């Protein structure tokens, strides 16, 4: 399951949008309305925190003692 960030689209442009997170499978369609307020929403693109599992590790780069 992935966690997606959504933001409400307020009717009044001076209102601050509400951001919230929802855990959904990647194949689920994006939400169209805020489950709490019923306002329309858009999905917000945010930076992920992936784990790099390739390349040389710090431990393999140590020099050997002679």
Image (cartoon, rainbow, N blue to C red):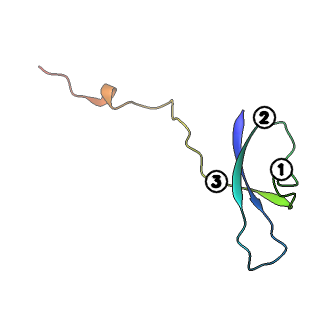
Q: Residue 48, percent across and down?
A: 59, 46
**Picture quadrant where residue 28 is located:** top right
Q: Secondary structure at mark 3?
A: loop
Of badges 1 and 3, the one in the foreground is: 1
Q: Residue 17, percent across and down?
A: 72, 66
Q: Nearer the viewer, residue 26 or 39?
A: 39
* Mark with earlier residue (2, 3): 2
Residue positioned 69% across, 58% down in the render: 19
Q: Residue furthest front?
A: 36
**Picture quadrant where residue 62 is located:** top left
Q: Quadrant of the C terminus?
A: top left
Mark 1 neighbour density, 10 Å: few (under 14) some (14–19) many (20 or more): few
The residue to which callout 2 is attached is 25
Tag on residue 35?
A: 1
Q: Nearer the viewer, residue 38 or 42?
A: 38
The residue to which callout 3 is attached is 46
Q: Secondary structure at mark 2?
A: loop
From the viewer's perspective, is residue 17 above or below residue 64? below
């Amino acid at each position: 399951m992935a966690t997606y960030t959504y933001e409400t689209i307020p009717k009044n442009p001076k209102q601050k949008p509400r951001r919230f997170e929802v855990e959904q499978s990647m194949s689920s369609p994006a939400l169209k309305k805020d489950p709490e307020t019923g306002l329309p929403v858009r999905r917000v693109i945010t930076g992920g925190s992936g784990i790099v599992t390739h390349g040389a590790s710090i431990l393999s780069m140590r020099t050997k003692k002679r």
